[in-house]
Image (tube, rainbow, N blue to C red):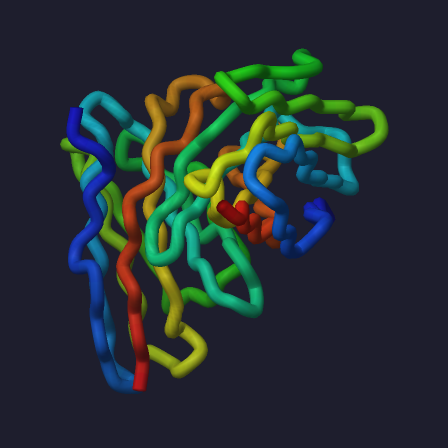
Amino acid sequence: KAGVTQTPRYLIKTRGQQVTLSCSPISGHRSVSWYQQTPGQGLQFLFEYFSETQRNKGNFPGRFSGRQFSNSRSEMNVSTLELGDSALYLCASSPGSGSNSPLHFGNGTRLTVT
Amino acid sequence: KQEVTQIPAALSVPEGENLVLNCSFTDSAIYNLQWFRQDPGKGLTSLLLIQSSQREQTSGRLNASLDKSSGRSTLYIAASQPGDSATYLCAVLLSGTYKYIFGTGTRLKVLA
């Protein structure tokens, strides 16, 4: 079974631009969650989707948004990029119907904002 | 507000040693706790998941325990190997949510 796939692996953007990151979950997994990882703040929860519905959102500004498609693939968008948005963005999937399934993470998208 | 702390932040041990990594959390209202490892530049790999009703889980050389009442979990690694070198993170799933709160991690180096 293929793992969680995130594209692209690396991105360099300038302040003020917007960016879209993509995540393809493991086949059959319906829950997709997104996390931001930085050296200073560690891993922080962004949002979680199940069957195209956002079930939880973290404490991030409205510039961070996401969506999930009917095939469970997910995208997250960051508008008006700031230098502080530079981070590793990780996507995780799980079967999703219950909460006692391990999370499976992709290798992340490394975003650098200059 | 749930806070998750991991001690120590870094650990260096010779190969073959048994070791214990610690994770503490402030709110016992959790659904489960997971231990992950992360290799440099990579995503996280789930090692063990302990449901809130369980006390421990084992997988190979790894054993994780959970004491909800005291807000603590430990990850025991037996007979450590250089391939165990990585950052180990614990995360708790808040009850009634799909949101994991992660600890700051323990960076482990096993010396050959």
Vertical relation: A67 (above or below) B92: below
Quarter of the figure with residue B14: top right
Looking at the picture, does residue A40 appear above or below residue A47? below
Q: Residue at x 76, y 31 (%)?
A: B28
Picture quadrant of residue A94: top left
Q: Nearer the viewer, residue B101 or A9?
A: A9
Q: Residue furthest front?
A: B112
What is the tally of numbered marks visible in this picture? 0
In the rendered view, tell whether residue B88 sits above or below residue A17. Answer: above
The answer to whether residue A90 is seen in the rendering is yes
Q: Left or right of A64: which side holds B18? A: right
Residue at image position (59%, 16%) is B57
Residue at image position (34%, 40%) is: A105
- Residue B89: name its quadrant: top right
Question: Front-most of B92 and B13?
Answer: B13
- Rendering coords of residue A75 (x, y %): 23, 51
On screen, residue B37 versus residue A70, left or right, reads: right
